[in-house]
Amino acid sequence: MYPNRHAGRVVLVTGAASGIGASISRQYAQEGAIVALVDFNAEALAAHAQSLGAHAGRLFWATADVADYGQCAQALEQLRRQIGADIDTLINNAGISPKTHGKPSNFWEMDPAEWLRVVDVNLNGAFNWSRLVTPAMVRNQFGSIVNMSSVAGKSFIAFTAAHYGTTKAALIGLTRDLAGELGPHGITVNAIAPGRINTPLMRTASNETNLAVIQETALRRLGEPEEVAEMACFLTAPESRFVTGQVVDVAGGWMLT
């Protein structure tokens, strides 16, 4: 952590109420940023904001389903009014990965509604927020976007299922396209591909699954949300302004290729 490294920056984090999103928003607050928290769970969002009470003067939050462009637009307008400034850093962290209680998530048995919901949240959510904040970034000729992909977007992982892996792979493509398009406007776009991270979502899987992943991970442990947060803060910090279009694994050596 680097106190004041992000002083004066206005950072918006989606899926900010728990897990990796909560750690990312906490890290930015500790590094001096003005932080806008967005999540669909109003109760969890308020609880997380309260837990960051020491930074209360620099915290703002709004509820929105990232898959709903209209809700996102309303949330952004509310946050802009409260903050009095444009968003210059966007962390597209919100994501879902439906589980089937230990049963195989066979593609040919998947509910089409579940497929569409995962695409809407994981991929369309990133489009919605990127589409909303980039006009101001282009106008200001400055900004940073980080998309939360996964090692599942780079390799086949049976227990994550096709909808999750597909959307995380698509985020890598979106990252590269946006990096190329927005680079001439001084905007960097990168992605993080976490491995198995110790979050509530990870804990919905069986102990056997998690132990198997640990044995396949070079560092022989799970990652912590704070380690992903450190990478997000680095990719949007002054020292990484010449880094764009990259996908950075934070996976402890899992799925080495």
Image (spheres, rainbow, N blue to C red):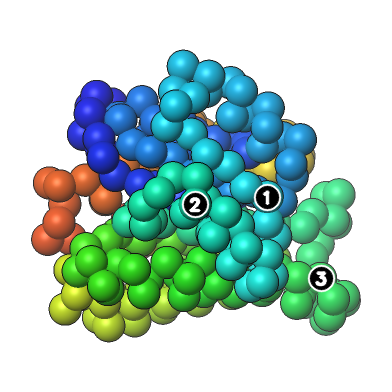
Residue to which mark 2 is pinned: 81
Q: Does residue 87 appear left or right of residue 106 in this picture?
A: left
Judge the density around disc 1: few (<14), some (14-19), many (≥20) Cα neighbours within 10 Å.
many
Above or below for 257 versus 2: below
Q: Is residue 190 visible?
A: no
Q: Nearer the viewer, residue 175 or 91?
A: 91
Give the distance between the C-alpha atoms of the residues marked 3 and 1, in whole angstroms. 22 Å
Residue under the image location 27 percent in, 61 percent down? 143
User: Which amino acid, mark 3?
Assistant: Glu
| Mark 1 element type | strand
Q: Is residue 40 visible?
A: yes
| Mark 3 element type | helix
Q: Does residue 23 appear left or right of residue 135 in this picture?
A: right
Give the distance between the C-alpha atoms of the residues marked 2 and 1, in whole angstroms. 15 Å
User: Which amino acid, mark 1?
Assistant: Thr
Give the distance between the C-alpha atoms of the residues marked 2 and 3, in whole angstroms. 35 Å
Above or below for 52 versus 180: above
Q: Nearer the viewer, residue 203 or 225?
A: 225
- Tell me, yes or no, whether the two marked residues, 2 and 1, touch with CB atoms within 8 Å: no
Q: Position of residue 138 (x, y in %)?
A: 27, 73
Q: Quadrant of the C terminus?
A: bottom left
Q: Does residue 74 appear left or right of residue 172 in this picture?
A: right
Above or below for 39 versus 131: above
Q: Position of residue 78 (x, y in %)?
A: 57, 54
Q: Residue furthest top?
A: 54
Residue under the image location 55 percent in, 72 percent down? 128
Judge the density around disc 2: few (<14), some (14-19), many (≥20) Cα neighbours within 10 Å.
few
Q: Position of residue 88 (x, y in %)?
A: 32, 56
Residue to which mark 3 is pinned: 114
User: Which amino acid, mark 2?
Assistant: Arg
Residue to which mark 1 is pinned: 63
